[in-house]
Image (cartoon, grey):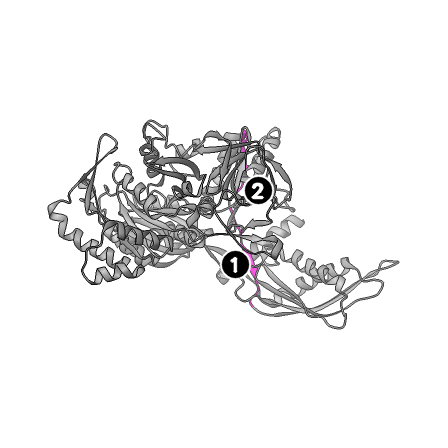
Amino acid sequence: MTIKDLARVRNIGISAHIDSGKTTLSERILFYTGKIHKIEEVKGKSGVGATMDSMDLEREKGITIQSAATFCQWKDLWVNLIDTPGHVDFTVEVERSLRVLDGAILVLCSVAGVQSQSITVDRQMRRYRVPRIAFVNKMDRAGANPYRVCQQLREKLNHNAWMAQMAIGAEDRFQGVVDLLTMKAFYFDGANGENVREEEIPVDMIEEAKTRRSDLIGALADFDDALAEKFLGDEYVSAEEAAKVMRKAVISLQFTPVFCGSAFKNKGVQNLLDAVGAYLPAPNEVSNEGLDQSNNEAPYQLKSDPDLPLVMLAFKLDETRYGQLTFMRVYQGTVRKGDMLINMASEKRVKVPRIVRLHSDEMEDIEEASAGDIVALFGVDCASGDTFTDGKINVTMASMYVPNAVISLAIAPKDKAAQTNFSKALNKFTKEDPTFRVSRDEESGETIIAGMGELHLEIYVERMKREFNCETIVGKPQVNFREALTQRAEINYTHKKQSGGSGQFARIVGFMEPLVDAGDKIYEFADETVGGSIPRQFIPACEKGFVEQMKNGLLIGAQVVGVKLIVNDGLHHPVDSNEMAFKTCAMTGFRESYMNAKPVILEPIMKVGIEGPEEFQGTMMGLINQRRGVIMGSSGNGGYCQIEAEVPLTEMFGFSTDLRSGTQGKGEFSMEFAKYAAVPRNVQEDMVAKYKAKRAAENK
């Protein structure tokens, strides 16, 4: 692929809140670009399901669980498209897709507008500096209003958002769109809206269209002096001039043009595809940085040039019946079938046996892939986030953000014979999904799986049954609590043990205190001893002892986080002091001083967004108040009410059932992890008492 060809490539993703119509939009894009010849609906009567929802579970539940990749051609554009999940439990799928994309379509519902998950997706786009255009979908719904959604983009997401189109009618009278740059009306004829008809703007809309075009040009004037001069001098600005400036503004992340349509009713999708080509960047227009391992991880600018040394990133894994399929984004250089690559994480050399282009779960073999491509490789063993090079360059890509797990379950196979399949399933899932974690509870001997929410773990339990023929027994969901200090406590402990021959001796003096602005940090350790009171070789043993003890706090046995540990004095014995003695001394010293630091229990607090008819507003607020929730804000539009709240995760179990019964099945909610916060004192006392009773019963 030459640089000239690269200008025609677009690597884009479709992201949005649940049920905004991402997968329906992807299905229409595939139809209009000729990749499929029959449209299937997400929850259609045929039961076939949308092309991009290739898992049986996705088709049954009508949700997207895994991001799916495909490629298609629109006019002279070559589009690599990734459809991502909207549900927050699968947020890592969105995270890793945006990590490798050059542009995105932010889909919004014309009635609900900017919802809680839209805010999360927008934050992820900002994290990876992904330029985006907005598409207001579902214009055929009652209460549709694209102009209100545009206003919400400005108010809630701080976007410099302006309408690039106007809707011709709305709700059941929605007919087409007006392009405000060319000042033409577009209608979509045919059984599936495949015939685009260009007409003059309806007479009764001309004045409004002129006003909105003037607003749009005025907003674009901030990005170009020549355009500003024309605008201020009341001169006509051509569509080509305005489009050029809009492209520059979108790529610089300072402007969001808003388009509208109805994917389900086959209206507005072709114009959106034109906008992808016109305003979203080609791979060579985006700056991608690697880390130069030969130069102390200094930033290294990667160029989308097929002739430079190869750098590519494995961003997603999928275990298939033919072996591991690794999704790759090629940032620089060219990879060919049979090439030898170096995995920068393990430093192993691997051969490329097969390269494929993907269309959902179908594949097309290709001989080579170059800068700007998104492809998949078979038979390359690696983990998600590994960088591959051809050995001519020592560069790695920065790893992506992986949120912490907030909920866990004890799980075991029903049948001992299924143990092998059970282990295989857990290995596959942990490799595929960085937010799915597996551990073993040493006390009970149980296998614990942890993830982002109830649905996340429920899907994996179901996949074990279907894909690995392994029925499981699942324990009650456990919330991942933490413990933290609230004040400083001195540590001064001497460990002595004499048992014939050489004994053990160590003394540690120091203190522990809460770590200011800890964020995700578990601890910070510092050695401030002077004069060799504790020999250098024993300092790591002190740290190890503290860290070991922090895994199990004394209140409820939870991980202790956000601790600053300082060792500033101590004693050692020339014969009896060793690593073991100092490690034991640190562990016991931590335990002895822990309660003096007035520890508290921290619980995960979820950001909850609830929507439902306004008549149920009181009921919905009541449900939140019953669950120790704090209402952060509420808004209403078109007879619908949106409530944002922060609620402890422990109180959210069974919420969906209560919400449905309290709103006659019309309410819906989404939640995502917000932060850890201290539990109320009375709740802490109950939890500590239960933990002590459980320990006492186990020790009988």
Q: Which residue is mark 1?
A: 602
- Furthest residue to the right? 501
- The segment highlighted magenta reads 468-486
Image location (x, y in percent) of residue 277 = 34, 43
Of label 2 and label 1, which has the lower sequence position? 2
Nearer-the-camera pick, 337 or 329: 337
Which amino acid type corresponds to the residue marked 2 in the rendered image?
Ala
In the rendered image, which quarter is residue 353 located in? top right
**Is 299 displayed left or right of 14 in the figure?**
right
Q: Amino acid at mark 1?
A: Leu
At a point 63% along the width and 44% down the height, the residue shown is 346
Residue extending furthest left?
Answer: 203
Real-space Cα separation, disc 2 to disc 1, in angstroms: 32 Å
With 372 as the anchor, is 219 left or right in this view? left
**Residue toward you, 511 or 476:** 511
Q: Secondary structure at mark 1?
A: strand
- Please state which of residues 43 and 686 is positioned toward the viewer in this rendering: 43
Name the spot of residue 586 as percent of width and height, x first. Answer: 70, 62
The tag on residue 383 is 2
Q: Are marks 2 and 1 in contact (CB under 8 Å)?
A: no
Q: Is residue 205 shown in magenta?
A: no
Question: In the figure, 527 relative to 395: above or below?
Answer: below
